[in-house]
Image (tube, helix red, strand yellow):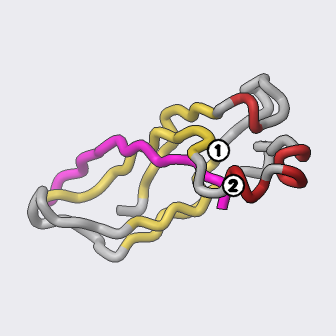
């Protein structure tokens, strides 16, 4: 599993600047996994997604005054399509990845 693409992302607008999606992009930089291929559909692979979010701007007021209250709250999500090898064929699966403040 070395390929992935962002299909769609949704942000809770109250927590972000620049409502225009033209400026906002989630770009996948790298995909790391602990398995190269899956032998059974029931197998689990741990996936690490490295993303470039330099054009996603959090509202500075929330960073300064509300950071503790917002910890672990879901601020949106990304739909990512992952491509993997299963029995010698490439298949894909779309996964919903939550966006949270850490």
Q: Quadrant of the image for the C terminus?
A: bottom right
Which range is magenta?
88-102
Secondary structure, magenta segment, majority class: strand
Horizontally, residue 42 falls left or right of residue 35, namely: left
| SS at mark 1 in the image | loop
Q: Residues within 10 Å of mark 2 (few under 14, many from 20)?
A: few
Query: Which residue in the structure is indicated by mark 2?
Result: 52
Quick one: 31 or 98, which is closer to the camera?
98
Q: Quadrant of the image for the N terminus?
A: bottom left
Give residue 73's position: percent from left, percent from top: 59, 48
Task: Tell me, for residue 26, which label it has, or none.
Answer: 1
Asked if residue 87 can be seen in this view, the reply is no
Q: Residue at x 59, y 56 (%)?
A: 72
> Which residue ends up furthest to the top in the rendered image?
20
Q: Residues within 10 Å of mark 1 (few under 14, many from 20)?
A: some
Q: Residue at x 80, y 44 (%)?
A: 58
Quick one: 38 or 96, which is closer to the camera?
96
Quick one: 38 or 98, which is closer to the camera?
98
Image quarter of residue 36: bottom left
> Is residue 80 in the magenta section?
no
Horizontally, residue 13 falls left or right of residue 18, namely: left
Give residue 68's position: percent from left, percent from top: 74, 58
Give residue 64's position: percent from left, percent from top: 89, 54
């Amino acid at each position: 599993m070395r390929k992935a693409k962002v299909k769609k992302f949704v942000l809770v607008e109250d927590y972000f600047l620049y409502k225009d999606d033209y400026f906002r992009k989630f770009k996948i930089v790298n995909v790391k996994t602990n398995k190269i291929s899956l032998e059974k559909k029931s197998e689990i692979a741990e996936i690490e997604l490295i993303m470039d979010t330099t054009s996603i701007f959090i509202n500075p007021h929330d960073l300064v005054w509300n950071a503790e209250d917002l910890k672990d709250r879901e601020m949106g999500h990304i739909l990512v399509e992952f491509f993997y090898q299963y029995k010698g064929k490439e298949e894909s699966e779309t996964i919903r990845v939550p966006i949270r403040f850490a």
